[in-house]
Amino acid sequence: MICKQSLIALSLLAVLEGIFFTPPCLAAVQQSNADDGVNQPIPELPGLTDEDKKQAFKEVQDDINPITPDGVRELRRKADEVEQAASAPPKFVPKPVTSSLLVDLKPGSTPPVVRLSKGYITNVVFVDQMGNPLIVKHVSKPGNQNQIVQVDWIKPDKDNPGQNNFQITPIDTYAMGNISVRVDGVENVPISVTFVSGQRVYDDRADIRIKGVGFGMSGHGMGLPGDADTVLISLLSGVPPDNSVQLDSSIPDVEAWKFKDSDGKDCFWIRSKWTLLSPAFLATRQSSDGTHAYKINPTPVLNMSINGVQTMVTLAGY
C-alpha cells in the first residue's frame, strides 16, 4: 500500500511536468503561429486629428438631436398657428355691446330681442322706468330649448332676496327662441324675451327697462312724452338721435347734444354718470350702471355733482 506521503509526492511531480513540459502537438501549433506572425505586436493606429474629432462629435450630436434649434422654434410656431386656427370662430369674431331696451307691456307691443353668441355670456338686467332694479322672480323656457341655451339665475328665497338679472349662453352657434320672465312689481304679467345667436354683434349686457313701472318711486318722469323715452333710452346706450349736433363740453365725462323734440323745440340732451343739479331737467332716465340721461332746455352752463363736489360744466358749439 502506497503511503500518504508518496501520493502527495506523485501529485506534485505531475503538476511540475504540466508546467515545464509542453506536449509535442501544442509545441507544433506555437511554432506555426510564430512563423505566420500571429504573435507579432499589433502596429499602432494613426491618431485622430482635431477635425476628425469635431466631425465625430457633430455626427453623435446629430444622432441625439436631429432637429436644429431653429427647426424646433419653427415647429412650435406652426403648432401655435394650428391651435389658434382651431379655436377661432368659423366666420368672424363677434363685437360685444351694451344695449338698453324699452319694454311696453301693452297688448300688441313687440318683445325685446337679445343678441347672443356662442362662447359668450349675456347678462340680462331688469329695471323699472326710473332705473331701479326689478328682482327676477322666475325664468322659464320651453323644454325643447334645453339643448340650445343655458340660463342661470338666483331664485329668491328667505335667505336670498334675489337679483335683478340672469345670464344666458347659447349652446348652438345658431339658436333662436324666447324665454318668459316674471319680475317683482309685475308678477301678473310675464315678460317675453326673444333671443337670437350667430350675429356679428352680441349683447354683453342688455338692460331691459319696463315702461310704466316705477313712476310711484320718484316724482320725476310723470307724464313724459313718448319721444323723450325713445331718445333717452338711446342715449343710455351711447347712441345719440339722428340729425343731432354734439356739443363741446368742458368735462369729457359729460356729453351733450342739441336736438329738436317732437314739438320742433330745440332741446339739449345730456349723458353722464354724474348727477345734474341745475338747470331743472324736463325728463330723465337712468341705466342699471348709474349712467344718467337728461332732457333740458338750452343753456351754456350745467351745474353737476361730480364725486360729491358741485362743478360747473360749460357747453359750446350750438
Image (cartoon, grey):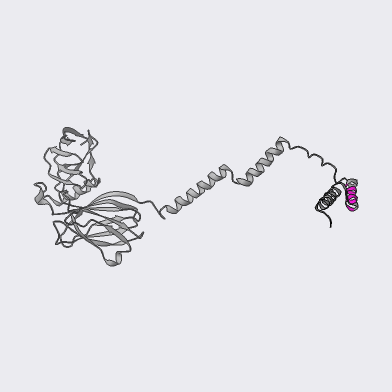
Measured from the top left, where is residue 252 in percent x and y?
Answer: 24, 36
Residues 12 and 292: in front is 12
In the picture, which quadrant includes the C terminus? top left
State left or right for residue 8 relative to residue 272. right
Picture layout, residue 147 above or below residue 123:
below
Is residue 293 visible to us here? yes
Measured from the top left, where is residue 60 in percent x and y?
Answer: 65, 44
In the picture, which quadrant includes the N terminus? bottom right
Picture layout, residue 39 above or below residue 173:
above
Residues 58 and 139: in front is 58
Measured from the top left, where is residue 186 in percent x and y?
Answer: 14, 58
Picture layout, residue 143 above or below residue 271:
below
Q: How many marks?
A: 0
The stretch of residues the image draws in magenta is 25-33
Using the rendered view, name the quadrant where residue 196 is placed: bottom left
Secondary structure, magenta segment, majority class: helix
Measured from the top left, where is residue 222 in percent x and y?
Answer: 9, 49
State left or right for residue 56 relative to residue 45. left
**Per the image, is 35 magenta?**
no
Using the rendered view, name the quadrant where residue 90 is placed: bottom left
Is residue 222 visible to us here? no
**Per the image, is 28 magenta?**
yes
Residues 104 and 191: in front is 191
The residue depicted at 68 percent of the width and 38 percent of the height is 54
The residue depicted at 82 percent of the width and 40 percent of the height is 43
